[in-house]
Amino acid sequence: MPEPAPQTSVDRWVDRKLSSKALRPRYAARLIAGIWLVTVVVFGVVMRIVDPDTFDTVWLAFWWALQTITTVGYGDVVPGEPAGKAIGAVLMLGGLSLLSIITATITSAFITRRQADMQASGQDPVMRQLHQIEARLDGIDAELRRLGPPGSPS
């Protein structure tokens, strides 16, 4: 079996922040807003540099990046250069992917946290059923031992 790749400091930071105890709704909202803000600023600046004829101010480029990453796309500003359109396509796909990944990650963290809380309090129905099945199997195992090996006199 191949050895797992070593974790970078970013991987460790993300694992720590997204652990079942660390992710709270307020933190999740800040995380989403922060990622989107950085993306809007970076792509806005890039578009201003790549397509200055269409984006005559960086503020207009920020507006375009915001409406593109949120998949609103009003159409009031459209890149004119082929490179700008390619960057726009990347931002559109990135916006959809980011939204999906963050939503799934946050939902998974909340579910994991809820399951851990239920297990700690003994209220997890799955664990209760597993304990019942375990008790029944222990009873069957004890009965089989009492009866002895097959073919032996009882």
Image (cartoon, rainbow, N blue to C red):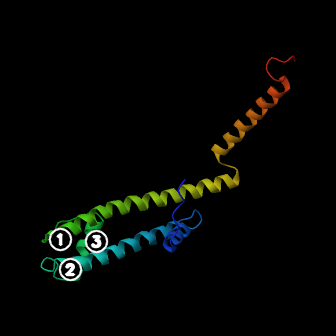
Q: Secondary structure at mark 2?
A: helix
Disc number for residue 101:
none
Front tag of 2 and 1? 1
Identify which residue is drawn at 17% across, 66% down: 75
Q: Secondary structure at mark 1?
A: helix
Residue 89 vs 129, above or below: the answer is below
Q: Pick out the residue farthest to the right.
A: 154
Mark closer to the chain start, 2 or 1: 2
Q: Which residue is mark 1?
A: 83
Q: Name which residue type carries label 1.
A: Ala
- In which quadrant of the rendered view does residue 150 lie? top right
Mark closer to the chain start, 3 or 2: 2
Q: Name which residue type carries label 3.
A: Leu
Disc number for residue 66:
3
Residue 78 visible in the current orientation: no
- Residue 36 location, x and y as percent? 36, 71
Q: Name which residue type carries label 2.
A: Arg
Identify which residue is drawn at 19% across, 83% down: 57
Please tell me how crowded label 3 is: few (under 14), some (14-19), or many (20+) other residues with Cα within 10 Å. Answer: many
Give the camera-side residue of 16 and 21.
Answer: 16
Q: Are marks 3 and 1 in contact (CB under 8 Å)?
A: no
- Residue 123 location, x and y as percent? 67, 49
